[in-house]
Image (spheres, grey):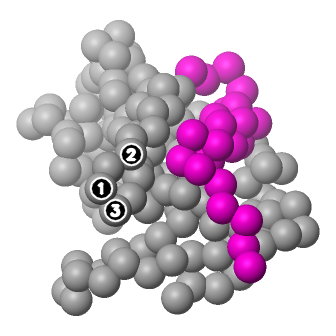
Amino acid sequence: MATFWAVAETAQLIRKALKEAFPGQKFLVRSNNYADGASIDVVWTDGPTQPDVENVAKTFTGATFDATTGNKSVRIHKFLGEQVHFGVDFIVCCRELSETYKAICSQAFDQLSGVERCELFNRQRYVNHSRSSNRPADSVARNIGTAPRPSPTAASVELFKSY
């Protein structure tokens, strides 16, 4: 039988893992309880990219949802040698960009040659730009961030089984 970690306890683990992976970066981690589940929102400004933060935070997801069938599956993890169920169904990560950061990226973008701009866009073309504005530099800025460090807390979590 797996030990159940409430959503608030899981949020504390996520805070710790993010602090280890991105020292000095401030994150707002909020837990939400609702009928039949719970979620955690992670919000930060500038700093690491959304995929980098998701790689750390989503380690603690306690369920999956199949939209085609409407089925929710429970995920059991192994954490610190015991089987655990993290009490959060969904973890949503949202990076915000400050105007200062966008201006710095825009200035750097404006100084690039046409060839350098094409190379930059080619490297970014497979990245999701759903929140980007119509300014090319904003799109690029969204995908430039600080590199993560290994998080001992997140690294100690492994998927045990899903059912």
Percent of width and height locating residue 38: 41, 52
Task: Measure the alpha-carbon separation of dots 1 and 2.
Answer: 7 Å
- Name above or below for residue 1 compared with residue 33: below
Q: Which mark is residue 36?
A: 3
Magenta includes 135? no
At label 2, counting other C-alpha atoms closer than 10 Å, the crowd grade (few under 14, some 14-19, many 20 or more) is some
Percent of width and height locating residue 8: 57, 40
Task: Measure the alpha-carbon separation of dots 3 and 2.
Answer: 8 Å
| Of residues 5 and 12, the one drawn nearer to the viewer in this rendering | 5
- Name above or below for residue 32 compared with residue 157: above
Tag 1 secondary structure: loop
The reply, left or right, for residue 42 in relation to residue 3 is: left
Q: Quadrant of residue 14?
A: top right
The amino acid type of the residue labelled 2 equals Asn
Q: Report if residue 36 is visible in the image.
A: yes
Tell me which segment is drawn in magenta: 1-26
Please name the residue shown 53% across and 27% down the image: 27
At label 3, counting other C-alpha atoms closer than 10 Å, the crowd grade (few under 14, some 14-19, many 20 or more) is few
The amino acid type of the residue labelled 1 equals Ala
Q: Which mark is residue 127?
A: none
- Name above or below for residue 155 compared with residue 162: above
The amino acid type of the residue labelled 3 equals Asp
Please name the residue shown 43% across and 61% down the image: 89
The reply, left or right, for residue 129 in relation to residue 22 is: left
Please name the residue shown 87% across and 61% down the image: 80
Q: Quadrant of residue 69?
A: bottom left
Q: Which mark is residue 33?
A: 2
Percent of width and height locating residue 54: 50, 52
Residue indicated by mark 1: 35
Percent of width and height locating residue 68: 20, 86
Task: Measure the alpha-carbon separation of dots 3 and 1.
Answer: 4 Å
